[in-house]
Image (spheres, rainbow, N blue to C red):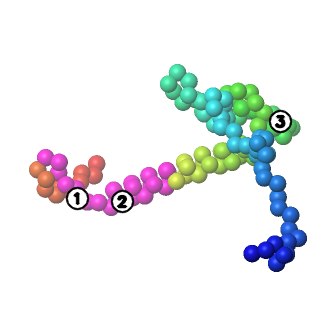
Amino acid sequence: MTDDNITPLPVRFKQPPSDDEPMLKVVSWGAGCNHRYDVRDGRTVHASYQIREGETEVECSLCKTRLDPMFVLRALASEETQWLRARQRYIDEMRRLRERSRTKCFNCGKMTEISRR
C-alpha cells in the first residue's frame, strides 16, 4: 500500500488530558463536621440549626459553620420523610395486629385466643 491513496480528513483530535488536578473533585467529609450528626464519646449527637431573624444563612450548632438554607431544608425534609414512613409502618402493623383474634402459643404450640384487656 502506498501513501498516495490516503486522503487526510480535516479532523483535529483533542489533546490528551494532562496530569493536573481535575476540575471537579469529590471531597469526603473525613474528620470534619457533616452538619447532620457527630459521634462523640460513643454516642450520636444530632446537629441543630440556628436561624437568625432577617438573615438568609443558617448556622450549624456542631461546628458553627454558616450553611446554605436549601441544604438544611433538604436535610430536615429527609428526616421528616423517614419519620412519616416509620409512623405509617407502625400504624399498619398495629392495624394488622388488632385484626388478629388468635395466635400460636409459645408453650404448647396450639392456637389460642388473644386477650383484649
On whether residue 54 falls in the magenta region, the answer is no
* Sequence-first disc among 3 and 2: 3
Badge 3 density bin: few <14, some 14–19, many ≥20, Cα 10 Å: few
**Quarter the N terminus occupies:** bottom right
**Is residue 68 visible to us here?**
no
Task: Classify mark 3: helix, strand or loop.
Answer: loop
Determine the residue positioned at 22% across, 56% down: 103
Q: Nearer the viewer, residue 105 or 34?
A: 34
Q: Amino acid at mark 3?
A: Glu
Q: Tell me if residue 73 can be seen.
A: yes
Q: Reading the chain from its start, which is encountered first: label 2 or label 1? A: 2
Q: How many marks?
A: 3
* Residue 29 rendering spot, x and y as whole percentages: 65, 35
Query: Dividing the picture into quarters, in which one does residue 62 lie?
Result: top right
Residue 75 position in % (x across, y down): 66, 44
Farthest top residue in view:
41
For image coordinates 13% across by 46% down, the residue present is 107
Residue at image mark 2: 96
**Is 32 drawn above or below residue 19 in the view shown?**
above
> Could you tell which of marks 1 and 3 lies nearer the N-terminus?
3
Does the magenta portion include 92? yes
Q: Which residue: 45% across, 54% down?
A: 89
Residue that numbered label 3 is attached to: 53
Residue indicated by mark 1: 102
Q: Amino acid at mark 1?
A: Arg
Q: Write down the region rendered in magenta.
A: 86-107
Most extreme residue toward the right is 10
Query: Horizontal and vertical percent for residue 53?
Result: 83, 36
Crowding near the residue tagged with mark 1, few <14, some 14–19, many ≥20 C-alpha atoms within 10 Å: few
Judge left or right: residue 32 versus residue 56.
left
Structural crowding at the residue carrying mark 2, measured as other residues with C-alpha within 10 Å and reported as few (<14), some (14–19) or many (≥20): few
Query: In which quarter of the view is residue 104 placed?
Result: bottom left
